[in-house]
Amino acid sequence: IFDIDERMVRLASTEERYAHMGTTLSAILFYEDLGMIAHVGDSRIYRLRENGLDQLTTDHTFVQDLISYGELTPEQAAVHPFKHMLTAAIGTQEPLEEVFYDMIALEAEDRFLLCTDGLHDMMERERIAEILYRGKGPQETASILVDAANACGGKDNVTAVVVFLE
């Protein structure tokens, strides 16, 4: 991820059209019975199992820091005016210092959702879980999630990648 960040910064410094860009990144690599997660920003990775929907990443935002310090509740953070202020992103002029990595055990029937804040901010977790659970295929499920987020207001870009393990 640090290499991607450096390449984006170099590109932005050489081509004006890329100046002031930055992005979030949430990725998962599957290998046998393990998943390697890498994450920067406020896009998220969720896993659906029999016991429910788990958020596997933590947002790199100002309000998430306030939640972690006990200064805000999640309910207060949801309506905070700075809820989208990132503390880490890829490709900005600020050096990338914070990258979340994790290894997770995979189980047959796990379902994963990688999504932008335009999806997870617009929908209740229960609704996301329901759509993932009922989905018949990854691509169709991703489309349904994007459509549902847009139907709820679609105030930001809405992107979803869904993976079903067999």
Image (cartoon, helix red, strand yellow):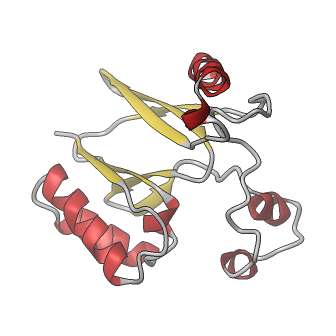
For the point 64% across and 19% down, the residue is 10
- Quick one: 25 or 21, which is closer to the camera? 21
- Residue 70 spot, x, y in % from top left: 87, 68
- Residue 140 spot, x, y in % from top left: 14, 58
Is 12 on the left-hand or right-hand side of 69? left
- Residue 34 spot, x, y in % from top left: 39, 26
| Quadrant of the image containing the N terminus | top right
- Quick one: 91 or 98, which is closer to the camera? 91
| Quadrant of the image containing the C terminus | top left
Q: Is residue 61 above or below residue 121?
A: above
- Quick one: 69 or 13, which is closer to the camera? 13
For the point 75% across and 60% down, the residue is 64
Is 23 on the left-hand or right-hand side of 88? left
Which residue is situated farthest in the front direction here? 16
Q: Is residue 147 above or below residue 65?
A: below
For the point 70% across and 49% down, the residue is 60
- Quick one: 18 or 147, which is closer to the camera? 18
- Residue 100 spot, x, y in % from top left: 64, 35
For the point 31% across and 39% down, the residue is 107
Is 84 on the left-hand or right-hand side of 166? right
